[in-house]
Image (cartoon, helix red, strand yellow):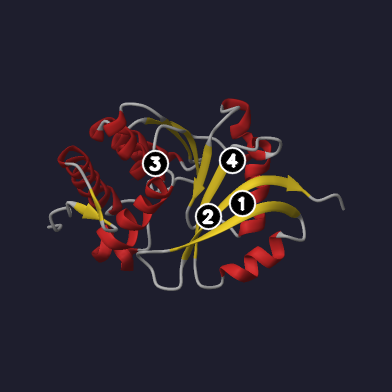
Amino acid sequence: MIASPPRELNGLRVSRETSERLEHFASLFLKWAKSINLVAPSTLGNLWQRHIADSAQIFQLAPGSKRWVDLGSGGGFPGIITAIFLAELNDGWVHLVESNSKKAAFLRVALAETGARGSVHPIRIEDAVTVIPQCDAISARALADLSQLLVYCAPWMTGDTQAKAFFHKGRDYQQEVDKAVSRFQFDLVKHASVVEPDSVVLEIANLSRKIQ
């Protein structure tokens, strides 16, 4: 059994329709997690706070209709959660990039059964820009260090002053930022996580590579 979904996430009101979609996604997630490794098993007991509410921060930081690219979507965090919020707007879209065929199958089912606004691309991240040439925002969670994430993002963000990226990071995020600034120039906003103490969401804009 899972707890009933909260009508608030991170202190913000959630509509009944979005709450029901999130609840259905949680049920699907727990069913599929029995057979494929979607997240660390030790975190399943705290699915709502650790994964769903944590992922919801991304849309809450950048609300409204956008073309999203979610890199390494895995179990749907944050991409499916963003796509569920977009369903309420009946606008915007999330391109979920996931090369693992089993996880991609789960993501397709989750989108179809929740009515979320997104599509799944079972390809390598490096190949995604040829299929998804433009976007407004990029997200990723528990995928890679910041330097590698910026390498992934560069084809979309370089030269686009409007595009932004949002990355969950833990307490050692500053070390990743210090490493990344040796290779890239970017504007950075650090949003304190409202879910995980000492964690942040890094908002990146105006990305460009430094000339070596």
Q: Secondary structure at mark 1?
A: helix
Mark 3 or 2 closer to N-term? Answer: 3
Instruction: Give the residue displayed 49% in from the left and 68% down from the top.
Output: 170
Real-space CA distance between mark 1 and mark 4, rounded to the nearest whole angstrom:
10 Å
What residue does disc 1 label? 149
Residue for badge 4: 125
Mark 4 residue type:
Ile
Q: Which residue is mark 3?
A: 63
* Mark 4 and mark 2: Cα distance apart in space: 11 Å
Query: Compared with residue 27, is residue 127 higher up or lower down, i.e. above or below?
Result: above
Task: Name the residue rendered at 34%, 34% in the picture.
Answer: 86
Front-most of residues 98 and 66: 66
In primary-sequence order, the first of circles 3 and 4 is: 3
Find the distance from the CA under tag 2 to the CA under tag 1: 8 Å
Instruction: List the residue tagged with mark 2.
Output: 143
Question: Pointer 2 and pointer 1: residues touching (CB < 8 Å)?
Answer: yes
In the drawing, does residue 135 fall left or right of residue 32? Answer: right
* Rendered image quadrant of residue 152: top right
Q: Position of residue 37 (x, y in %)?
A: 37, 55
What's the amino acid at mark 1?
Leu
User: Under tag 3, what secondary structure?
Assistant: loop
| Mark 3 in CB contact with mark 1 (< 8 angstroms) | no
Q: How far is mark 3 from mark 1, CA to CA?
A: 22 Å
